[in-house]
Amino acid sequence: MLNKIRIILVETSHPGNIGSSARAMLNMQLTELYLVNPKQLPDEQTMATAAHATDVVNNAKIVPTLLEALEGVDLVIGTSARTRRMDLPMLSVEDAAQQAMAHVSKGLNVAIIFGRERTGLFNEELLMCHYHAFIPSNEGYTSLNLAQAVQIVAYEVFKQYLSHNEVEALPTQNHVREKASAKEVQSFYDELAHKMQVVGFLNPDKPGHVVDKLKRLFQRAQLESQEINILRGFLGQIDQRNQSSNETKDS
């Protein structure tokens, strides 16, 4: 079950942190590690800090973009040690772990994202998430070591896993919502932004402002694949109507 949860580290700068994070993961029975554009690839120091979790490092998937790391994921949780002025649903780490376990128990895939050591996740990366998991810390010193953050989240996930397995088969819903993948959602956003530019709805000087608000709106809705298809079909119908209208004018 826990193999449906992937830990994603974005642009790590220190190879030792990769190993320490892998060790923290394996302590809590998590093995799926994704590295997005690491500044340094895993090396001897990585293996040294990984201790007995070298298999986690050796089997890690290294990809150039976060979107590729999210391929096939149904629920995306971004982590941060500081609050952001964003409209994303914010959860405690415990509540985020509950959401993760609720999804994997239905056979769905979950990604938990950790940002850069110094700057964390960028806002546009958090906008790719369904939830923002906030790790509270000393207001005077909010900086958490990457591996420490991974350990905290992994521990809460493992607690939920143990709790779930202690309870005999809970009633399951007959219908499990098939959430849209990160790739489907991003493709829809790209098409929507393009269509909005074509019809002149977006301010060409600040196109991202409106688009970001719409992203937050749709992320809160946790769109299903079928809903994405409906929205894209609607956009396609607009294209057809515009094309027909232009052809009528030309004739």
Image: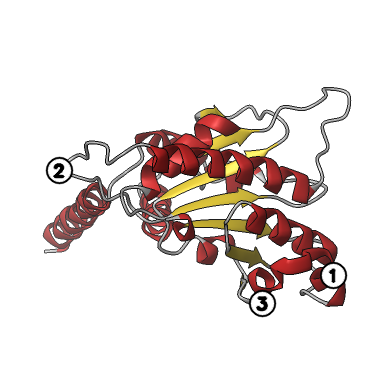
Amino acid on which disc 2 is placed:
Asn
Return the residue at label 3: 58
Residue 174: numbered disc:
2
Instruction: Name the outermost residue toward the top.
Output: 139
Determine the residue positioned at 64% across, 69% down: 56
Q: Distance between the residues labelled 2 and 3?
A: 39 Å
Mark seen at residue 48:
1
Among numbered discs 1 and 2, the one appearing first in the sequence: 1
Residue 245 lies in what quarter of the image? Answer: bottom left
Could you tell me which secondary element the residue under label 3 belongs to?
Answer: helix
Task: Determine crowd level at label 1: few under 14, some 14-19, many 20+ residues with C-alpha closer than 10 A.
Answer: some
Q: Where is residue 246? Give x, y as percent.
A: 19, 58
Amino acid at the residue labelled 3: Asn
Whether residue 38 is visible, yes or no, is no
Q: Which of 238 and 48 is in front in this view?
A: 48
Does 220 sit above or below residue 66?
Answer: above
Of the image marks 2 and 3, the number of the one nearer the N terminus: 3
